[in-house]
Image (cartoon, rainbow, N blue to C red):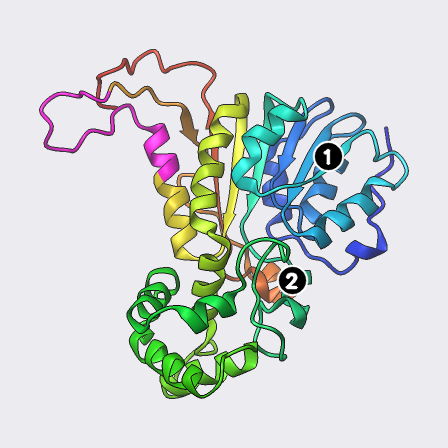
Amino acid sequence: MSAPVAISKTLAGHQPVLRDEVIAALRPHAGGRYLDATFGGGGHTCALLDAAVPDGMVLALDTDPEAIDRALTLHREPGIADRLVPVRANFATLAAVARDYGFVPLDGILLDLGLSSFQLDQPERGFAFRSAGPLDMRFDPERGRPARDLVNTLSEPALADLIWRYGEEPGSRRIARAIVRERELEPIATTTRLAEIAARAVGGRRGRDTHPATRTFQALRIATNEELAALEAALAGAVDVLAPAGRLVVIAFHSLEDRIVKRFIERESAGCVCPPRTPICICGQIPRLRKVTRRAVRPDATEIDGNPRARSAVLRVAELLPEPLADVAPGTRA
């Protein structure tokens, strides 16, 4: 049997969230083909490669060029080159990428929707506000508009709507009003300045468990990277390229993502998606997925103590049905 994957120095210190639970859910095996749609620090990919020795393969995607550089470094480790295929791509296109690289059908797909430790710990990327950095927030710094463009150009109502919709921030209107007032004095270009504006707008941190700018930063990051639309595309594509009995595993870190994942799995597991008052089914839907996790899986206290960034993680698992359920015919409510 091959030796465990030697994690390169560039990956040292990275702690993949819910690693053991992910591996248990994906059930990697020799000869299997898996897709890690968000390589990040590479922890989940390394665990998959270890569990699928000697010839299981992983297609690793990431839109962040620095993450792909880490994946290429791992690719050069002894015994890995033939088993790891790094590709710089947004996970919204995972189905097309899997087909292009001959990985279809896949035995398992992982979507880890959180930011990597590397992104959070680099002030120049603009994801965090504890250290001053440019207000960027793009996963791919070579594409799209940085967050500062939204902050400095959107109207006050549009800003308030964005912060509420994607951050679920109760003080969204006050924060938007403060942003517009402050940018008239000078464009808002740094993370720390935006964080200070948001904090003052809602009265500071008193009585709050998290920094008062947290939800605003979340909202801007989601909008900047069009994350929710990408997630919906990735989920739809995943079902199209999984093998029968292949597993889809998703780790979400806030309610907006998890809601999309939960509803998608419920919809694809149902025999009918017609409105409840429809007297007979007219949609003709056939279930394609089976729920594996009836309830979301969360990190235990030990993992949270060792990796506080895991505290909001939520894992859900679904399995592609090998064939339409025999007892749920088209036009029948499951």
Which one is in front in this view, the residue at disc 1 or the one at disc 2? 2
Find out whether residue 228 is within the magenta segment. no
Image side of residue 164 versus residue 50, left or right: left
Q: Is residue 25 visible?
A: no
Local SS, label 2:
helix
> In the image as oriented, which residue stretches furthest toward the right?
78
- Residue drawn at point x = 53 percent, y = 50 percent: 113
At which x and y percent is residue 164?
33, 66
| Residue 89, above or below 325 | below
Is 296 in front, or is 180? 180
Is 10 in front, or is 52? 10
Q: Which residues are magenta?
A: 264-283
The quadrant of the rendering that contains the C terminus is top left
Image side of residue 208 versus residue 112, left or right: left
Q: Which residue is mark 2?
A: 119
As drawn, the label of residue 51 is: 1
User: The residue under label 2 is which amino acid type?
Assistant: Gln
Label 2: how many Cα within 10 Å (few below 14, some 14–19, many 20+)? many
Magenta residues: mostly which secondary structure?
A: loop
